[in-house]
Amino acid sequence: MTRREAVNRRRGILLMAPTVLALGTLTVYPGVWVVWLSLQHRHPIFGVSRFAGLDNYTFLAVDSRFSSAAVTTFVFTVTSVALEVVLGVTAALAIHAQQGGRRVALSLLLLAWAMPAVVTAKLFEWLYHPTAGLLNVALGGHALNWLGDPRLALPAVVLADVWRTMPFVAVLCYARLLAIPAELYEAAQVDGAGRLATLVRITLPMLGRILLVAILFRTLDALRAFDLMFVLTGGGPAGTTETITVYAYRALFQTLQLGFGSALGVVVFALVMAVAWAYLRLLRTSTVTA
Amino acid sequence: MRSRAWFAPLGAFLVWLLMLGGCVGRPEGEPVTLVFKYARILGSADPLPGLLRAFETAHPGVRVKGEALPWTSDDQHQLYVINLEGRSPGFDVLMLDCIWVPEFARAGWLADLTTHLTPDELAPHFASAVTAGTYNGRVWALPWNMNVGLLYYRTDLLARYGLRPPETYEELIAAVKQIRDGERDPALEGYLWQGKQYEGLVVNVLEAFWANGTRLLGEDGTILPEPARAADALRFLRGLIEARLSPAWTTAADEELSRRAFGDGHAIFLRNWPYAMDLFQAAGSAVRGKVAFASLPGRARGAAGAGSTGGAHLAVSRRSRHPELAVALARHLTSRPAQRAIALGAALSPTRRDLYHEPELVQARPDMPRLDGLMLAGRPRPVTPAYLLVSSTVQPEFSAALVGVKSPERAIADARARLDYFLEGIR
């Protein structure tokens, strides 16, 4: 190593130090601490602090509330992300095809996205109001018990989530649509491709990569979903809208079961990591083949 | 030389980290500031600022900072837990929901007030409010305001059919049927109560348990000592919804949802807290002058009805730097003149019994004397440091029985099994 290389190397380490230090203190240290906590019976109120081994995890395996929360998290993630992608792409195509007023359409779309989740939840609370809510009034007389019926509560929460985050997918797709070179469409036209063929053969494949990114972000968000259900239903009725994150919040911050709650947190973390890893692999292979 | 420039941001970052960790102490000799954490009081006029200024006048050199708590009970609890467990000296006097007092006392977050009190100092308060502030024979919090579950009814509708307020649920059901048959108004609901999955559901189910002669925790701490009776109470509540005596949306109803429907004139009976009366009697209310309240019903051949009590207490943080002054402030705010001012200016009911018969207060709120008897008959929720654990564990089970996802027996059995495991973990 030359002198110059050594200096460069030292400078590199120095440059990285703040990042490593910040990540270490703010992410790695708390992360390791949570895993450590999850292996304990820790209850500050009762002065309980003892090693529990895998007790908390073995209880999770037989805990019906946890399995219900896991199913809810899964159903919520799959349905909300699927609807958001379909509606988001549709909205992006619609705006792209629009002759004028694109700016207005985009702004309106972003309005929903810009609203904090809690505000959205409060808004939908009024929409779902059993007697005075706009939805029930619009449905005319058939008062649906949106947030109190175990079959309707989760769809109601999904609907609110789709309304709020569909614009995110739409805006990403719209940006990609703008970047598709016009020559491609012209060439398709010359070859005699119809509108459907153009959509299926050109537009959608060109959207593929950006959609994967959008789906990755949305899935990770949906897996950690908390605010909407917490405000709208508190996890009810009968725990049908309780996600793992809501369950973890209750254990950690309401009942102060720090060990048990941490175990739930670790499960969410593992879930998010697994999904992120799978997507990133998918993204990489699609890059190679593209 | 050039490489040294990189030390500056790094150094700044380290200084920032140090500042995060170190607590900046207050210099001596400056005026003392007491921090009082409380939930904003709703009502015609918030009497608190005036009361805090009065304390400052009586204690020169002391400044009291009233800091508002978050809006919901869950958020308030979370704020306290994070700060108190983190040993923050951030507040001196704290307003606590009565169900938190044993928990916070057990955790060692509160100052023991027993030695600060004169022997009979708490005698003028409702005994149940004093009990709620007591844990292990020591006093940890002073009673501040009081709540009790009430049965509201429409006087005009009951009078039209020559009915008296029901003393049992059986009478209530008969009254609902008779009035709805006569009124032929499809929008008129029978009995509204709170069945959403939250703390309010536990309160409503507890009241049904008591009417059915059973309880959530036995004297010796057994969980749901009479499961068959408890299941029967849940079945009764579910039956109200199935028979449409209570609307289907009861399973999503909290206090405000049910209060609004009743206040709009769309129901005959309502279970709610005393605060609702002021809103029903306010100018512009659709039911003004047509509402009265009574004790919650009991069951035929069963126990008499009793409402669940609630309310707020004032406690002193163990981390307070000025415990003597903090106790003085808590005392000042729970004193007779202070509770009187709060009862006059806001829709909160005092914990001092004699105020319920004080002429000026009775003139402003004519229901006060009746409320006294109902408060006295009210029953507290289980007084245990594990209350939130118990409540949050039974909520989804009770809710499952109400919406019919589980049979009442199954819900009770599941609640017992889960509580057994969790309560074992804290022994």
Image (cartoon, coloured by chain):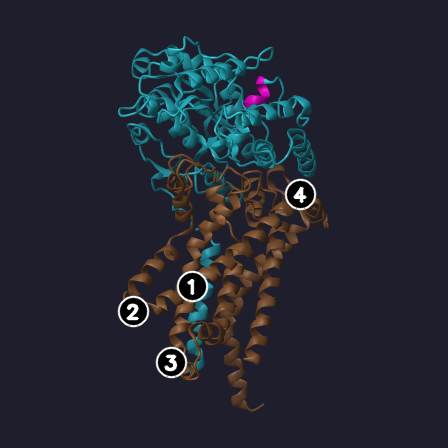
Chain colours: A brown, B cyan
Identify residue for label 1: A90
- Crowding around mark 3 (Cα neighbors within 10 Å: few <14, some 14 to 19, many 20+) is few
Label 2 sits on what residue type?
Gln
SS of the residue at dot 2?
A: loop
Q: Position of residue B29 (x, y in %)?
A: 36, 42
Q: Position of residue A23 (x, y in %)?
A: 53, 65
Q: Is residue B208 magenta?
A: yes
Which of these two is toward me, B176 or B123?
A: B176
Identify residue for label 2: A99
- The quadrant of the image that shows the C terminus of chain B is top right
Chain assignment, label 4: A
Q: Are marks 4 and 3 in contact (CB under 8 Å)?
A: no
Between the C-alphas of marks 3 and 2, the distance is 16 Å
Answer with mark 4 or mark 1, whichever residue precedes in sequence.
4
Query: Taking B192 as reference, is B361 above or below it?
Result: above
Point out the frontmost of discs 4 and 3: 3
- Crowding around mark 4 (Cα neighbors within 10 Å: few <14, some 14 to 19, many 20+) is few
Between the C-alphas of marks 4 and 3, the distance is 55 Å
Report the span colored magenta: B207-211
Instruction: Specify whether B94 is left or right of B403.
Output: left
Identify residue for label 4: A64
Identify residue for label 3: A182
Q: Are marks 1 and 2 in contact (CB under 8 Å)?
A: no
Point out the frontmost of discs 4 and 1: 1
Query: Taking A202 as reference, is B248 above or below it?
Result: above
Chain assignment, label 2: A
